[in-house]
């Protein structure tokens, strides 16, 4: 009598040898409290990375994002910085380095944008462009 088929018996369906390929890596995700940034932080945590949740004065949302990272079995911290201020960026990186180690992965996701329709942007979009696209 044959035994029932199991997933682990099939080489193409077996779990990968390294289920957490980013174990031991530190990821800094800016704009990590909502949307694509939060989803990216969760994906990195699922892959085993220690995740620094970057935000700007969104402490409650950052704590929620950090709880999600920890629920996925990863370590992490939240760091706040105004990314338009080079000194604040340096302090943010120093904080990450001192608390969880040097940054191996940077996801530069943060962006500021005016809350208006595309047709209304014009000059209003200029500060956004300048803050997110280096000269």
Image (spheres, rainbow, N blue to C red):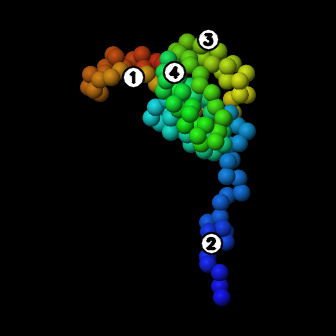
Name the mark on residue 87: 3
Q: Position of residue 12 (x, y in %)?
A: 63, 67
Q: Disc 4 marks which residue? A: 59
Q: How many labels does the image show?
A: 4
**Residue 109 shows up from this direction:** no
* Circle number at residue 113: 1
Is residue 46 among the parts visible in the rendering? yes
The Cα–Cα distance between marks 1 and 2, rounded to whole angstroms, is: 51 Å
Relative to 107, residue 43 above or below: below
Q: Say which label, 4 or 1, has the lower sequence index.
A: 4
Instruction: Identify the image quadrant of residue 3.
Output: bottom right
Report how far apart the C-alphas of labels 3 and 2 lie in the structure.
Answer: 56 Å
Label 3 SS: helix
Q: How far apart are marks 2 and 4 (CA)?
A: 45 Å
Measured in 3D between alpha carbons, the distance from the residue under mark 3 to the one under mark 4, in whole angstroms, is 20 Å
* Between 66 and 85, the one nearer to me in the picture: 66
Which one is earlier in the sequence, the residue at label 3 or at label 2? Answer: 2
Label 1 vs 2, first from the N-terminus: 2
Label whose residue precedes the other's in the sequence (2 or 4): 2
Which quadrant holds residue 104? top right
Locate the N terminus by quadrant. bottom right
């Amino acid at each position: 009598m044959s035994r029932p088929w199991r997933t682990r018996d099939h080489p193409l369906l077996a779990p990968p040898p390294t289920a957490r390929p980013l174990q031991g890596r530190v990821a800094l995700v800016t704009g990590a409290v909502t949307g694509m940034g939060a989803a990216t932080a969760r994906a990195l945590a699922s892959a085993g990375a220690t995740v620094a949740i970057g935000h700007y004065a969104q402490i409650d949302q950052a704590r929620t994002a950090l709880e999600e990272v920890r629920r996925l079995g990863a370590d992490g911290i939240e760091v706040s910085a105004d990314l338009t201020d080079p000194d604040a960026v340096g302090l943010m990186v120093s904080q990450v380095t001192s608390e969880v180690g040097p940054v191996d992965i940077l996801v530069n996701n943060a962006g500021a944008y005016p809350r208006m329709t595309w047709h209304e942007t014009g000059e209003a979009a200029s500060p956004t462009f300048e803050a997110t696209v280096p000269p």
